[in-house]
Structures are given as structure tokens and as C-alpha cells.
Image (cartoon, helix red, strand yellow):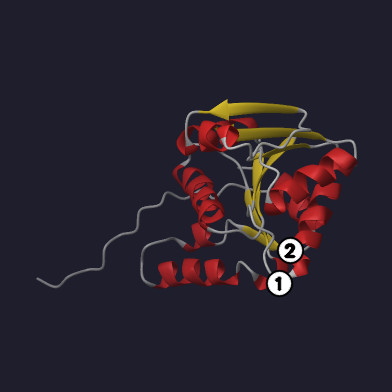
């Protein structure tokens, strides 16, 4: 099934640190420029820290719309970006992730840490289960997401994931290609269950 609704907003998951490779910052800026150029709405975690702040700053500088979803804890610590188009404060991380998912038509992960991985894996799981029908992409700057791709292939080899679900994530370094591919993304038409191996009597 092809993406059934227009691509109007993209949730971006990324680090609240900058990382050691300057290409990560440049990649975040390139993605921000492309989102703004296409007139898409950026949905992200609401802070001014790390790659998250770089993304928001870039989209805003290019005249784009940025919606921040931030937890009460981070808001109270003063971590919210002060120039956002709109923001929401949620009770906790679970609420934050749910609202980001609701506000987005597709997802892109940039390099990041535990929070980024958790968000990426959660939305991919929801797509796998059919709880939403939204494409998921990784901006693979410097091969950052190659271990994720290898892990998925390993899960297929070991009988825990179907190849269609392993292959449903989009990987690329070019933000224009990522967004074009998300627009044409097709949902895997298989369920997640794998027949157990035959056991002799």
C-alpha cells in the first residue's frame, strides 16, 4: 500500500549533543534546509540542544514552520527553544513520543543516542504492526546507521524478523532523496509472524 496521505510534516529524531564528526551538524543543516524548501513542517523534541537545536534553527532561518514537543521536565529545566512556531509540553517521554507521532506524516532519524534509538525503533515497530502507516528513514551520515542495518539483517537470519520489515527502513545521506523516497514509500504487506522451525516427532 502506497502512502495514502500527503507528506506535510516530518518528525525528526536526533541527538541533543552535536557529536564529534562535524558532518553530523552539516547533515542536520542540510535536512533542515530541505524541509523548509519543500514547505514541510518540522516536528521535533522542542529543545535548543545539539543537533535538535541545529535542525530547528535552520528550518526557522529558512522561513519554515517548527513544532516542538517537549516534556515538562525539560521545559522546567529551561531547555526549550525560544523561537518555535508552536510548542507543546507533555507530562513525560511517553506522551512526547505519542504527540510527535500523531503530528507527523513520516519520520527521519539523524545520528543520536538512546533517545533517538528508542524513538526510531518505536515508530518502526508501530509501522510493522500496522498501528500507523508511515514511512521511516535514517539519514546515514558517515555510515552512522550501518550497525542498525546489520542488526536488522541479523534478526532476519536468526528468525526474528521478516526481510520485508528489515528492508522497510530507508537509508541515505542525501535529504532530498530521503524525502522523495518517503513520499513514494510503500507499506510492507506481510504480517510479522514467522512459522517456527519444524521439529521432528
* Quarter in which the N terminus is drawn: top right
Q: Which of 159 and 53 is in front in this view?
A: 53
Q: Cβ–Cβ below 8 Å for labels 2 and 1?
A: yes
Dividing the picture into quadrants, the one containing residue 201 is bottom left
Query: Is residue 93 depicted above or below 173 in this figure?
Result: above
Q: Earlier in the sequence, mark 2 or mark 1?
A: 2
Q: Which residue sits furthest left?
A: 201
Q: How dense is the environment of label 2, judged by Cα within 10 Å: few (below 14), some, or many (20 and up)?
A: many
For label 2, the SS is helix
Instruction: Tell me where residue 185 appears, x and y as whole percent.
Output: 67, 48
Query: Which callout, 2 or 1, points to the residue nearer the camera?
Result: 2
Where residue 69 appears, as percent x and y from the top left, is 62, 33
Q: Is residue 58 left or right of residue 140?
A: right
Q: Distance between the residues labelled 2 and 1?
A: 8 Å
Frontmost residue, 179 versus 57: 57
Does the image show residue 38?
A: no
Left or right of 88? Residue 36 is: right
How far across and how far down the image is residue 74, in percent?
A: 56, 38
The answer to whether residue 140 of the structure is visible from this angle is yes
Q: Which residue carries the number 2 mark?
A: 24
Identified at 55% across, 68% down, the residue is 149
Residue at image point 54% right, 71% down: 147
In the rendered image of this protein, does residue 79 appear above or below residue 157?
Answer: above
Give SS at disc 1: helix
Identify the residue at image location x=71%, y=44%. 48
Q: Quick one: 60 or 101, which is closer to the camera?
A: 60
Residue 141, image quadrant: bottom right
Q: Identify the disc placed on residue 142.
A: 1
Indicate which disc residue 169 carries: none
Q: Which residue is drawn at 63% across and 31% down?
A: 103
Amino acid at each position: 500500500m502506497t502512502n495514502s496521505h500527503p507528506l506535510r510534516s516530518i518528525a525528526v529524531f536526533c541527538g541533543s549533543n552535536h557529536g564529534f564528526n562535524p558532518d553530523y551538524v552539516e547533515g542536520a543543516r542540510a535536512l533542515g534546509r530541505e524541509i523548509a524548501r519543500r514547505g514541510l513542517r518540522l516536528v521535533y523534541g522542542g529543545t535548543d540542544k545539539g543537533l535538535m537545536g541545529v535542525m530547528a534553527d535552520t528550518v526557522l532561518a529558512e522561513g519554515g514552520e517548527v513544532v516542538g514537543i517537549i516534556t515538562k521536565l525539560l521545559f522546567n529545566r529551561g531547555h526549550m527553544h525560544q523561537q518555535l512556531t508552536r510548542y507543546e509540553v507533555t507530562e513525560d517521554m511517553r506522551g512526547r513520543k505519542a504527540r510527535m507521532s500523531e503530528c507527523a506524516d513520516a519520520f527521519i532519524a539523524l545520528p543520536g543516542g538512546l533517545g533517538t534509538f528508542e524513538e526510531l525503533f518505536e515508530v518502526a515497530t508501530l509501522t510493522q504492526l500496522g498501528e500507523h502507516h508511515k514511512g521511516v528513514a535514517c539519514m546515514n551520515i558517515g555510515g552512522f546507521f550501518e550497525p542498525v542495518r546489520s542488526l536488522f539483517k541479523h534478526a532476519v537470519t536468526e528468525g526474528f524478523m521478516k526481510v520485508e520489515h528489515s528492508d522497510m527502513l530507508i537509508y541515505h545521506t542525501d535529504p532530498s532523496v530521503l524525502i522523495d523516497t518517503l513520499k513514494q514509500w510503500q507499506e510492507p504487506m506481510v504480517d510479522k509472524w514467522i512459522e517456527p522451525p519444524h521439529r521432528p516427532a
